[in-house]
Every structure is written in structure tokens, then in C-alpha cells.
């Protein structure tokens, strides 16, 4: 089986269910797994400023790591509601190596609304923002095991349509925060702080 994250949760689940201890595994579904990701330092600093502004304006504390976790959960909700692997792949492929995309606006807004713009793949010889930026910051992001498993199952399903897609769970986390900050910086996310506060309450 292909490796979809550094922790290989899907492979572990399959191995456990073959054993006599599957009931034990259920006890750990909500225990966070720590994922190491790397994002451009400029994105990290902008995320830190966003979280500081959120706390100052709404008195709601949210770390950059927690913001990434929240965006990932929102991404999972988006995948369940769209239930369209082509749309999901095109969204993720925007940030994959050697691809440049054009954007179109989707009619419906899901969850926090930051997934509204869906990028359509278009071949080009340009590097994306993550590839071009050599100054990277390392972040440890906690994700519940059950949510990590959902992400890996999604990637495994995507493998059937796009063999060798090369997307990992860590890459999804990196894409979530990079895409969010990119849209926020461009002024595309109206009232996003209020929506995040509502989601946290």
C-alpha cells in the first residue's frame, strides 16, 4: 500500500482490524497525532498575525497550529458535502509541483467559506508559491486519529482516479494554510474572523 502520511494511519488501521485487538484501536480515535509540516515563513508569519488580530478583535485565542487543524476539519467537511473527487483533486493540485491554475468561483459556500474558490488545472512550467519559497518554517500540527484516517482514505480513493498523485496528508495541511492565507491576503475572505469565532463557539 502507498504511504499517504508519515504516520501511515490507514495501513495501521488495516493491520489492526486483521488482529484480535481492533477494540483497543477504537479507544485511540480521538487522540491527536502530531504531524510535521513545512510552509513558507512568510505564510507562517501572516498566520501568526491573523491569529493575533483574531484575539485582539474577538478575544478568541487561536494558535497557528490550531488554525491549521480547524482549516483541515473544514476541508474534510467540504469533501463530504461535495463528494466529487475531481473537484477535490483539482483544488489540491493547484499547489502541487509544476502546476499553475486558473480559478473559477463555485456557487455554494461550505463551512467557513474559504474553500469557495475552486481552482481548475491548467498545464504550465511555473513553480507554485510553496516551491519557489526557500525560507520554510516547520510546524507541528495535532490531528485526531479519526480525522487523519478520513484524510488518508480520501487520498487512497483519489489514487484510483489519479494514480501516483503524490499528495500526502502533510501536503493537505500545508495547502490548507497556504491557500487560506493567500485568499485572506488578497481580500477574498469577507468576515472570516467572525465565521471562525462562530465555528469555535
Image (tube, grey):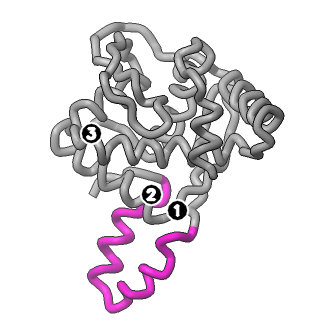
The answer to whether mark 3 and mark 2 are in CB contact below 8 A is no
Residue 24 occupies quadrant: bottom left
The answer to whether mark 2 and mark 1 are in CB contact below 8 A is yes
The extreme bottom residue here reads 20
| Depth order, front residue of 11/84 | 84
User: Which residue was labeled with disc 3?
Assistant: 82
In this view, the mark in front (1 or 3):
3
Question: What is the magenta range?
Answer: 6-31
19 in magenta = yes
User: Which residue was labeled with disc 2?
Assistant: 148
Numbered tag placed on residue 102 in the rendering: none
Q: Position of residue 38 (x, y in %)?
A: 61, 36
Asked if residue 69 is positioned above or below residue 178 in the image, the reply reads below
Side of 75 where 45 appears, left or right: right
Q: Residues within 10 Å of mark 3 (few under 14, many from 20)?
A: few
User: Which residue was labeled with disc 1?
Assistant: 144
| Depth order, front residue of 48/172 | 48
Residue 23 occupies quadrant: bottom left
Q: Earlier in the sequence, mark 3 or mark 2?
A: 3
Amino acid at each position: 500500500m502507498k504511504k499517504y502520511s508519515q504516520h501511515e494511519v490507514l495501513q495501521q488501521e488495516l493491520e489492526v482490524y486483521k488482529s484480535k485487538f481492533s477494540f483497543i484501536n477504537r479507544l485511540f480515535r480521538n487522540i491527536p497525532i502530531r504531524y510535521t509540516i513545512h510552509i513558507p515563513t512568510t505564510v507562517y508569519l501572516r498566520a501568526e498575525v491573523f491569529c493575533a488580530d483574531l484575539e485582539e478583535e474577538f478575544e478568541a485565542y487561536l494558535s497557528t497550529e490550531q488554525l491549521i487543524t480547524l482549516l483541515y476539519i473544514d476541508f474534510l467537511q467540504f469533501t463530504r458535502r461535495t463528494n466529487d473527487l475531481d473537484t477535490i483533486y483539482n483544488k489540491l493540485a493547484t499547489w502541487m509541483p509544476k502546476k499553475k491554475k486558473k480559478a473559477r468561483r463555485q456557487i455554494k459556500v461550505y463551512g467557513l467559506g474559504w474553500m469557495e474558490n475552486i481552482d481548475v488545472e491548467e498545464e504550465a512550467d511555473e513553480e507554485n508559491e510553496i516551491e519557489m519559497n526557500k525560507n520554510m518554517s516547520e510546524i507541528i500540527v495535532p490531528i485526531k486519529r479519526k480525522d487523519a484516517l478520513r484524510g488518508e482514505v480520501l487520498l487512497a480513493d483519489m489514487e484510483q482516479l489519479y494514480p501516483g498523485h503524490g499528495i500526502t496528508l502533510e501536503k493537505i495541511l500545508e495547502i490548507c494554510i497556504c491557500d487560506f492565507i493567500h485568499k485572506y491576503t488578497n481580500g477574498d475572505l469577507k468576515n472570516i474572523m467572525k465565521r471562525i469565532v462562530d465555528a469555535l463557539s
